[in-house]
Amino acid sequence: MENQPNHKPISKFLSLVLRHKPEKIGLELDLQGWADVDSLIEKLNANGPAVSREILEEVVATNPKKRFVFNQNHTRIRANQGHSIQIDHGFQPVEPPEILYHGTAHRFLDSILATGIQKRNRHHVHLSADLDTATNVGQRHGKVIILSVPAVKMYQAGYTFYLSEDGVWLTEVVPPEHIIQPF
Ligand code: HQG
């Protein structure tokens, strides 16, 4: 898990270069967000945290949120989601479960109820199928509240949902009329 103390800084740096700023170490991502593993290791060692192939394998395998994925023969790597750079995720639309949850901070509630759950700096609004995950996500922002979203109802109304490889439900926006307030 990320409880191996040395892995967290590497994981954070990988998020930075695979989701947001590959140019920070001169890395190139293809249109689907994939980086060449040899090139990544070389560039990390030159301009980022020193990482061997073994460590990289371990960081990917033990990342609690499965943030990164290798291709089949482990020659390429990408972030599963969370990009701010434009990439083609190849996500397929899927029918969501009845209810999805969004954990957020109490102080955002008024604004969210006025304008909906917005994707902000991300490509999608992130929702989860279980309360534990939503709670963990919300706690990152402060005093947590959980909003419920009647996802099937939204889907039937024409909204598109995607499920990322690491189990995050994604959609464009959740408008105020589809937010069930916390009780
Ligand atoms: C809030 C982590 C005011 C929204 C997690 C959230 C997740 C509004 C914050 C992933 C708003 C954005 C995503 C509105 C939305 N008014 N506040 N109208 N609409 N917000 O971090 O969902 O560590 O961008 O509620 O596991 O918290 O990146 O989104 O509180 O899956 O792998 O604006 O990040 O994964 O915050 O988290 P974020 P999030 P990683």
Image: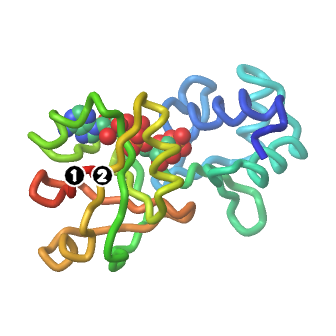
Q: Looking at the image, which residue sits at the far front?
A: 183
Q: Nearer the viewer, residue 81 or 78?
A: 81
Left or right, residue 142 beside residue 108? right
Left or right, residue 178 beside residue 135? left
- Amino acid marked by disc 2: Leu
Left or right, residue 86 beside residue 10? left
Q: Residue at x 66, y 57 (%)?
A: 69
Labelled disc at residue 181 = 1
Q: Which residue is mark 2?
A: 147
Q: Is residue 67 above or below residue 166?
A: above
The answer to whether one can see residue 149 in this image is yes
Q: Nearer the viewer, residue 91 or 2?
A: 2
Secondary structure under tag 2 reads strand
Asked whether disc 1 touches disc 2, contact meaning CB atoms under 8 Å apart, the reply is yes
Q: Residue at x 31, y 33 (%)?
A: 106
- Amino acid marked by disc 1: Gln
Please tell me in which quarter of the rendered image ligand 1 is found.
Answer: top left
- The image's colour scheme reads rainbow
Q: Is residue 63 above or below residue 101?
A: above
Residue 132 drawn at (x, y percent): 53, 54
